[in-house]
Amino acid sequence: MKKIFSDQRGFALLNVILLTMITSFAAMILLNAVPRAKNPQSTLRLTALYVANEQFAQLESMAAAGELNVGSYSFQGLDKDLTTENAGAPITFKVTTQVTDGGGNLRKVSVKVSWTFNAQNFELASERMMRVVEPN
């Protein structure tokens, strides 16, 4: 009987290590989710920031092609990026973009992302200067 159990040394230690790892991963996931559940506004602000950065990226692509003109632009990304359910209910973001002359081949780009949550209106505004490449 001792011969059978002598080959099993370290098996309990391995079980304890694996159980500790699984428990720590579960605790880490839960601790990360608790603040988001209490305050979904921080997640919505991150999503709005993502939407604004996506708009800037699309407009920078237009500027690199020499196609960024003064005026208003609608959202240039995918329509599905404007809707999220991070807060437990569908939230739709509205993007307004204004491009003004910054002098020479520079353009001042202002992007505002707005959304409504719990009957309150929120807005994230950001600005960048972009250089329009002139065709040769």
Image (tube, rainbow, N blue to C red):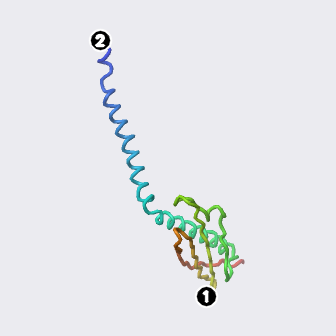
**Amino acid on which disc 1 is placed:** Gly
Q: Secondary structure at mark 1?
A: loop
Residue drawn at point x = 53 percent, y = 71 percent? 119
Residue drawn at point x = 62 percent, y = 80 percent? 98
**Amino acid on which disc 2 is placed:** Met
Instruction: Give the vertical position of 56 relative to 18 (above or below).
Output: below
Contact between labelled residues 2 and 1, with CB atoms less than 8 Å apart:
no
Location of mark 1 (residue) = 103
> Could you tell me residue 96's position as x and y percent?
62, 76
> Could you tell me residue 57's position as x and y percent?
60, 69
User: Residue 84 is drawn in which quadrant?
Assistant: bottom right
Q: Where residue 115 is drawn, which disc sits there?
A: none
Q: Secondary structure at mark 2?
A: loop
Front residue of 125 and 61: 125
Number of on-image labels: 2
Instruction: Give the vertical position of 61 relative to 8 (above or below).
Output: below
Mark 1 Cα within 10 Å, few/some/many (few <14, many 20+)? few
Q: With 123 as the anchor, is 59 left or right in this view? A: right
Q: Of callouts 1 and 2, which one flags the residue occurring earlier in the amino acid sequence? A: 2
Location of mark 2 (residue) = 1
